[in-house]
Image: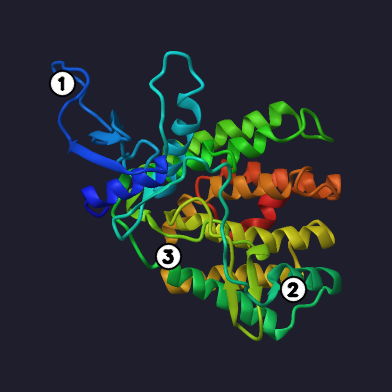
Amino acid sequence: MPRLTITALTEYLETLYGQPVRVISMTSHGAQEEGDDLKGFGYGAPLFLEYEVSGERKKAVLETMAPSSYGHDHFSDRAQAILWEHASFNNLPGHVRSIDSGAFLGSGRIVSTGKAEEFFLLTEFAEGTGYFKDLERIRDSGKAAALDLDRALALADYLAEVHAERLDAPSLYTRRIRDLMGHGECIMGMIDNYPGEFEFITQQLLKRIEVACNEWRWRIKDRTHRLRRVHGDFHPWNILFRTDRDFTVLDRSRGEWGEPADDVATMTINYLFFSLQRSNRLEGDFEKLFNLFWDRYLDKTNDRELFEVIAPFYAWRGLVIASPIWYPHLSAAVRKTIFHFIESVLKADRFDPHDVKRYLA
């Protein structure tokens, strides 16, 4: 973060108050309570400000939040916490009041975010057709063209390249495995959004899967050497193909770094998913695409350890594609096969891509 100057602070305060401001002091000293410093961990260092607005002297504290392994690894984590604090402090009787929330720019300037109610993202428009359209065509015709095989290879090559970049941040890997379990978009979030009872899906079945996934968390959360650059939501609806192997990816999710098994499971389970929609088994050209992708990715990465960690990621993505909320028109037979797959994979000590038919049975 750039160094905060008196000039930048004055400009910000004048924008906030809409009138001239004179900054009297800006210091890291002057804590409001003294003690024996028994607290060994803090998230950020406050700045104590004194300034004058229209002849009225005011005091304030400007607080930042430091990166940490307590759920504050990402810029977005820290932004979320600060925005929540500004929105909630003034709603609790007796709580110190929040004046504003803001953000530091690379130039050293400060901008106010305190009046914001919602945030948005503006991206470029990408030409192309969703990869799921290719899979729908193969599902309906039963035939994959040579280009379909080549595109599967292109996707495997892309992931191998993405996953080649490592990061030495053990606590972040552990956090990503923890998020796999507890994040609202991941295993527990998916389970909590299933209906109480639906067809053969009972609370007991979902609980059994959740418990098994948590056992897997304890098996893999310390494999911190595996932290890699990831996409985080690498499924056919987030890939736009143009001609031949030319494509763009959309909607990277849940952090820049994670477990490569996330991306591999997210893509490969869709070859199963579309094959199940056709015949409720993995066969034909979808089986060819599934094996082709796996073989190419392993040839490029030689990541055989992937087999020892991928199970809970397949469970999560299985819960997504079997969900009556996300896919309300699936047959009960297909859902049941997906749940067989989830439980079989979780029971296996090591995933074997060439044993998928047994997992589905």
Q: Is residue 331 above or below residue 98?
A: below
> Helix or strand or loop: what does disc 2 sit on?
helix
Q: Which residue is mark 2?
A: 134
- Element assignment for label 1: loop
Q: Give amino acid for label 2.
A: Asp
Q: Residues within 10 Å of mark 1 (few under 14, many from 20)?
A: few
Residue 35 against residue 183 in the figure, above or below: above
Q: Residues within 10 Å of mark 2 (few under 14, many from 20)?
A: some
Indicate which disc, 1 or 2, sits on the residue closer to the N terminus.
1
| Residue 245 % position (x, y) | 60, 83
Where is residue 180? Give x, y as percent. Answer: 51, 43
Of tags 1 and 3, which is closer to the observer? 1
Whole-percent x and y of residue 287? 69, 68
Residue 174 placement: quadrant: top left
Left or right for 246, reference 144: left
Please state which amino acid type lies under the numbered disc 3: His
Q: Which residue is mark 3?
A: 163
Report the residue marked by disc 1.
37
Q: Residue at x 59, y 65 (%)?
A: 250
Q: Earlier in the sequence, mark 1 or mark 3?
A: 1
Residue visible at 56% across and 78% down?
154
Alpha-carbon span between mark 1 and mark 3: 43 Å
Q: Is residue 205 visible?
A: yes
